[in-house]
Amino acid sequence: MRPEKEKLCVIGCGLMGGSLLMRLEGKGYEIWAVDIDEHVLEEIQKQGLAQHVSTEPAKAIAWADMIVLCLMPQTVIELIAEYGCAIKPGAILTDFYGVKSPILQAARQYLPSCVAYVGAHPMAGLEKGKFVNATPMLFNRANALLIPAPEAEDTAVDTVFCLLKRAGCVRITHCTPEKHDEMIGFTSQMMHLLAAGIANHPLYPHSKGYEGGSLRDFTRIATIDAEMWSALCMLNREFLTPVLKDYVKNLESVLQTLEQEDTDGLKTMLQSANAVKEQWIHAPTKSTH
């Protein structure tokens, strides 16, 4: 039996971690917040979002029943390598970032067998990060993915599922790390790269006044945390590269119809896209818990 007030450690209190702290206020957790920014920790204490704060993770990690890592992907791996052996038996480790295969590999390498790894990925975010932009509504009605290690027990998976629900997520889908990385390469990482590609187009700086909603919608996420997204994309290059190649093939086919003045071919492509989008709209949303 887990204690009535579960001891939750949140490491990294930027946009994701800060928003989680805000949402979990009054939800039955005893919380220890860890961040390298002392000013952020002061604000967390001021708002009453955590009972304990520190800039160093060691004591918090040893204390916690569940640890949530809201850090840059490489930092997640380094932290697991350095502190994994300090996690107490029966505790759960989860993380909120957008690449899972390398993190699962690190968890298997460095975590004791008595510690469960259950990856999580709330599909939510803003153009700007950091605690100053955190909001308790960030995860509200968001989709989320649950990526447990195959050896994780059902009780550990249920515990992280409940955390996502309490954070505000509504549709939670189980998947393997490989499926997660392939699909997030498509639905998230490629989309950010395409938006950046449009913003880097030579005509974009001159488009003010010529644009409609389509350009504004498409480039919304071009305001990007370059350090974080380059790290995510590089860490997921095994899955992201073929996803991008498939998109480039589609774009080359469109270009070919224009160069060959093939109106019927272009029309067929657009009709196909319209039909696929209609099917996508009416397809049931997966929720597998």
Image (cartoon, grey):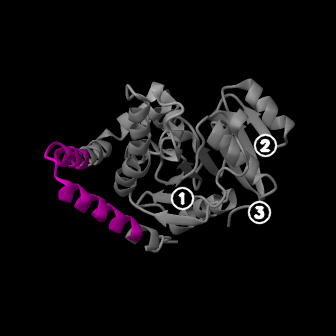
Q: Position of residue 31 (x, y in %)?
A: 74, 46
**What amino acid type should be assigned to the residue bearing mark 3?**
Glu
Q: Residue at x 69, y 25 (%)?
A: 37
Q: Earlier in the sequence, mark 2 or mark 1?
A: 2
Q: CA distance from mark 3 to mark 1?
A: 25 Å
According to the picture, the residue beneath numbered tag 1 turns out to be 144
Q: Residue at x 47, y 37 (%)?
A: 73
- In the picture, the disc for residue 4 is 3
Q: Residue at x 47, y 61 (%)?
A: 152
Residue range in magenta is 249-278
Q: Is residue 100 magenta?
A: no
Q: Nearer the viewer, residue 52 or 110?
A: 52
According to the picture, the residue beneath numbered tag 2 turns out to be 50
Query: Compared with residue 21, is residue 229 higher up or lower down, i.e. above or below?
Result: above
Q: How crowded is the residue under tag 2: few (<14 C-alpha within 10 Å), some, or many (20+)?
A: many
Q: Nearer the viewer, residue 286 or 193?
A: 193
- In the picture, the disc for residue 212 is none
Query: Compared with residue 223, is residue 1 higher up or lower down, i.e. above or below?
Result: below
Query: Compared with residue 252, is residue 40 higher up or lower down, i.e. above or below?
Result: above
Secondary structure beneath label 2: loop
